[in-house]
Image (cartoon, helix red, strand yellow):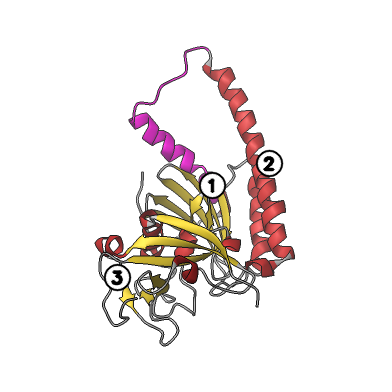
Amino acid sequence: MAVTKEKRAIGSEELQDVVFTRVNTEASVLREEGGASQDPPGCADEATGIRETERASAWREAWEEVIDHMLIAWGCDPEQLEDEGIDPPTRKTILRAIRLAQAFRDEGRPAPDSVVPDPNKGIVFERRDGDVSEVLYLWEDGTTEYQLFLGTRLVERRTL
Amino acid sequence: MGDESEPITDDEWLYRRVPASTGWYSHETGLKPEAFAPHKTEDATGLSISRAKFKTIAEAAKGRPGKSYYVAILSAGDLQKQGIVVASRPLLPNDPGHAELPDLNSSNRKTAETLERQRILVSLCLRVEGPFATAEE
């Protein structure tokens, strides 16, 4: 796996090839290196197809939950997030997050495990599997970043 | 209670207050790195924490009236081992146990080092207590 901390802008198509897929990819590589077991021959294709359909449906529902019960709720009542040392996300950032979530939902992308505000009007989407974490960071200044962590190490970082 | 002029020793416990409304902590999914993210103006000299020598967990959890908070508990020695400096910064007379992590501050909040240190702090968290509600005025 390439390890780089170099920041570079990438096009949206290139982003869509990587965001929230690396967790599954990197985690699978780690499992294979650890000698994970295989399905019996002949059963794999049908079982895989059923699992993938169920998984896609679960992801779509999870994205809906993020959009309806989190992002839209924040937009309707941003004061719920206000506190000492915390500036809640602006309406503009919340709209950016909603559009991003809708796009990923419609593309069948894996849903995040968590969506939280940061203390500076930003919003952070994160997906984890073991030691691998993927982050979509919507900073308050309008920039969006993709970050890949291995444990606590930031191994990849791209401005979108 | 201790003397606020004493330097922080490795055997001290440290408290970090975490607002419940943010989702930065839940019993189901644990603590998030955003709980240690510096504010862009209020953490100019470093991320605020409290020394357990000077306040109880309930006192460390006090915040805005009507709001609820968790308290993340860390060991000063664990932070020192990871190269994260803990500096005593008493705010007299009301907060003699105030301390800061100067390596995580307003100006470096977006750097890779700070983003990594946030995750290191999550990994060093010993436990989280709460939620504690701050009484309405």
Closer to us: mark 1 or mark 2? 1
The residue tagged 1 is B28
Task: Tell me the residue that label 2 is attached to.
Answer: A61
Amino acid type, callout 3: Val
Residue B108 in view (yes/no): no
Name the residue beneath numbered marker 3: B85
* Disc 2, SS: helix
Crowding at label 1, few (<14), some or many (≥20) Cα neighbours within 10 Å? few
Q: Nearer the viewer, residue A48 or B57?
A: B57
* Dot 2: chain letter: A
Task: Tell me if residue A41 is in the magenta stretch.
Answer: yes
* Corner quadrant of residue B121: bottom left
Q: Work out whether disc 3 and disc 2 sit on a shared chain.
A: no
Residue B78 is situated, as x and y percent measured from the top left of the image, at 29, 60
Amino acid type, callout 2: Glu
Q: Nearer the viewer, residue B80 or A108?
A: B80
Front position among marks 1 and 3: 1
Q: Within 10 angstroms of label 3, few (less than 14), some, or many (20 or more) residues?
A: some
The tag earlier along the polypeptide, 1 or 3, is 1
Q: Residue B73 shows which numbered tag? A: none
The region drawn magenta spans A15-42
Chain of the residue displaying label 1: B
- Cα separation between marks 1 and 3: 30 Å
